[in-house]
Amino acid sequence: MRILQAIPVKILCITSRVPWPLEKGDKLRIYHQLRELANRHEVSLFALSDGPVHPEAVAVLKRFCKEVHIHRLTKGTVVVNLFRSLFKGLPFQVGYFTCGSAIKAFRKFAGKVRPDRLYCQLIRTAEYRKVLPQVPAVLDYMDVFSKGVERRIPKEPWWKRWVFRLELKRLLRYEADSFRNFERHTIISRQDRDLLPFKEASAVTVVPNGVDTEQIGRAHV
């Protein structure tokens, strides 16, 4: 990922899920990105988790990440986070993963790592950028959450639609605000970039997913 600079630097990545095991698209994307970045840079990972963590996750990730910290979000914490997001004006997608204990843990971890660059995967983690305002940061939108919610509204029961309309309104604003809060921005495809709801969308760099040819080769041996 040239967007994170060719000169070797310390990169701190924050994710909304632990990228192991590789059963979801966002996990696959960040796992291979971090593995590739680690070939040239010093990579550390702060991962949020709202469920059980695979017993081998830390060991696997430490094969290429110098430091790994997993912060658990309990069900009670998530409920409080969602309730607070109503009054803070945050999208539920963002509020779900944002709380004082996690921010405190992230600040402590960042103090230990002392990164030169911050890499936030998905707008779910964009609030954590505020902990390190002095560190140049990259946001990987990956895809466009607002468009996904917009497409769901007609399919939801009438009594749920007001929640999704509220979420859509907040996501549209937050996606645009996030662009202004980061120095660099990436997304998975040109088609997704064209759906971003702000005029600066053309400045977002397309970083498509690749294919692990070694894994495919092993599967056919």
Image (spheres, grey):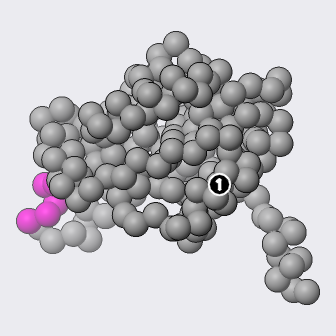
Q: Main secondary structure of the magenta part?
A: helix
Number of numbered discs on residues: 1
Residue 41 in which image quadrant: top right
Q: Quadrant of residue 88?
A: top left
Q: Assess disc 1: are there few (<14), some (14-19) or many (≥20) residues with their C-alpha within 10 Å of its C-alpha.
A: many
**Is 94 left or right of 62, judged from the image as shown?**
left
In the rendering, at what x and y percent does residue 74 appear? 27, 56
**Split into 4 quadrants, where in the image is the C terminus?**
bottom right
Q: Is residue 211 above or below residue 175?
A: below
Q: Residue furthest left?
A: 159
Residue shown at the point (83%, 76%) measured from the top left? 216
Residues drawn in magenta: 159-164
Quarter of image, res 211: bottom right
Can residue 50 be seen here? Answer: yes
Q: Residue at x 52, y 51 (%)?
A: 143
- Asked which secondary structure carries label 1, the reply is helix
Q: Percent from the top left, x then y, of residue 105?
A: 39, 35
Residue corresponding to mark 1: 61
Could you tell me which quadrant the N terminus lies in? top right
**Residue placed most toward the observer, 189 or 134:** 134
Q: Residue at 74% across / 25% down in the picture?
A: 9
Q: 74 or 127, which lies in front?
A: 74
Give the side of residue 135 with respect to residue 85, left or right: right
Identify the residue shown where x is 52% and y is 13%. 134
Asked if residue 202 shows in the view, the reply is no
Query: Which amino acid, mark 1?
Result: Leu
Residue 208, compared with residue 214, is above or below; it is above
User: In the orientation shown, which residue stands out farthest toward the top?
Assistant: 134
Percent coordinates x, y for residue 48 in the rendering: 42, 49
In the image: residue 83, left or right of residue 46: left
The vertical placement of 86 against 23, above or below, is: above
Q: Is residue 92 magenta?
A: no
